Amino acid sequence: MNDVAGAPPLADVLRVAAFAWARLRAGTSLDRALELAHPAALAPAHPRLAAAAMDVAYTATRHLALIDAVIGRLSTRTPDVPVGALVAVALGQLLVSRRADYVIVDQAVRAAKANADTRAASGFINALLRRWLRERDTLLPEFERDDSVRFNAPRWWIDCIRAAYPHDADGIFRVQRAAPPLVLRVNRRRTTVAAYLDRLAREGIDASQVGAYAVWLHTPRPVDAVPGFGDGDVSVQDAGAQLAAEWLGVRDGMRVLDACAAPGGKTAQLAEIANVQVDAVEIDSQRAARIESNLARTSARAHARICVIVDDVAKPQSFAPKAGYDRILLDAPCTASGIVRRHPDIPWLRRPADVAQLATLQARLADALWPVLAPAGRLLYVVCSVFPEEGERQVERFAAQWTDARAVPLTSGMKASVQLLPGETAAAQPYRGGLPTVHDGFFFALFEKS
Ligand SMILES: C[S@@+](CC[C@H](N)C(=O)[O-])C[C@H]1O[C@@H](n2cnc3c(N)ncnc32)[C@H](O)[C@@H]1O
């Protein structure tokens, strides 16, 4: 049964999403799990099956704690993994009510019957989903008294954010639960923000400027439906993320190290800002391949000499020029606690010890790179995290370690470091005083070698 014209059957969508959900719960990131849940292998091919399964799996992940609570309460024993996964993604759909309840339950039962490892449990799945429909009005308020359910994060994660931001924590959680804004970076080599906004208006697309080169499309859409995306006129990049390359202060002719470069959003941006020579270094060869496709789409090599290098930035002696770099952008691996609204799986994949482990790695990378910065050169440290261990604490340690490191303002009128907390899309003025207000959570710090 096809409940929405042109859409893949919901039963197939649920099966693919359930496959990804099971892998997510075993510790695989949701995006990787969705790649592994190759739709063709699981269900009859349909051009929109992968996108629909992604939507269903993401919806369930945004309600992971609540779904666990529901299954825990309504089943007498823990269901087998494939059964629990199918129930979970179907519950996710019932929670957001985008289709009639009876359609979702019917399609979940069909999905169960189509697979050998869920067939015997189709009655159980039917009964559990129906019971949820009967009892949800009583159970939901009860479950939502639990912070873990309200904020969709493990208790330790909530405690860490509360300890760091006693006054802002609830705001952070609220933003992180909202749908992420689609923000674009306008390629200044090809067009202007004003011209691009005109183009959007002509095509009837609501948008506003949220940064010097950042445009927020008020209604998200797939990238292939974003005007000019395929031609490289714009790229998808959060307005906060766009600040890093801007604040690095690159000028024509500079030698730049883009450390930890994949998928290459900032590499392409550097080439849009100035005619630079960039070494884009990435440890993961598969992810490094994505840098190349980003550079090709934005024609970045028309303006910059860019060398994509698969290597470990902790050992820069193998790729750094003798004279050192004029600029180093260290976009370090981190907990990604600032981008949870884009990746709701993050709090569920991390363990408490990860914060300290990642902070140790970030310190190692920063210490390894400082010696390959040329005199008077600048290093910008950035993480998409809100945990102070990865931000302010990191900078205090770095400044104590390197006596020739001088903290310099990120841009005129600003301090040498800033913690941006995720900003709401409902902000009355999305772009104020040269700073975006619609952005993810980031920490930035700028040092100059004296
Ligand atoms: C935050 S992402 C970088 C995003 C990228 N700068 C952009 O704007 O598109 C961090 C990247 O660092 C890479 N990475 C982690 N450890 C690394 C290391 N020791 N050397 C080089 N790259 C590393 C990861 O594989 C990941 O692709």
Image (cartoon, grey):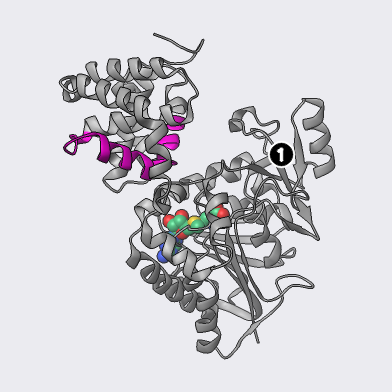
Q: Is residue 391 left or right of residue 432?
A: left
| Residue 133 falls within the magenta-colored stretch | no
Image quadrant where one finds the C terminus: bottom right
Q: Residue at x 66, y 35 (%)?
A: 229
Q: Which residues are magenta?
A: 54-81
Q: Amino acid at mark 1?
A: Asp
Is 69 a magenta residue? Answer: yes
Q: Is mark 1 within 8 Å of ligand 1?
A: no
In the image shown, does 159 or 380 lie closer to the viewer?
A: 159
- Kindly indicate the quadrant of the structure image that contains residue 306: bottom right
Residue 80, x across and y down, in percent: 17, 34
Residue under the point 65% across and 77% down: 377
Tell me the residue that label 1 is attached to.
233
Q: Quadrant of residue 246?
A: bottom right
Residue 149 placement (x, y as % from top left)? 41, 47
Please determine whether, in this image, residue 106 is positioned above or below residue 323. Answer: above
All told, the count of numbered labels is 1
Q: Which quadrant holds the N terminus? A: top left
Q: Is residue 134 above or below residue 304?
A: above
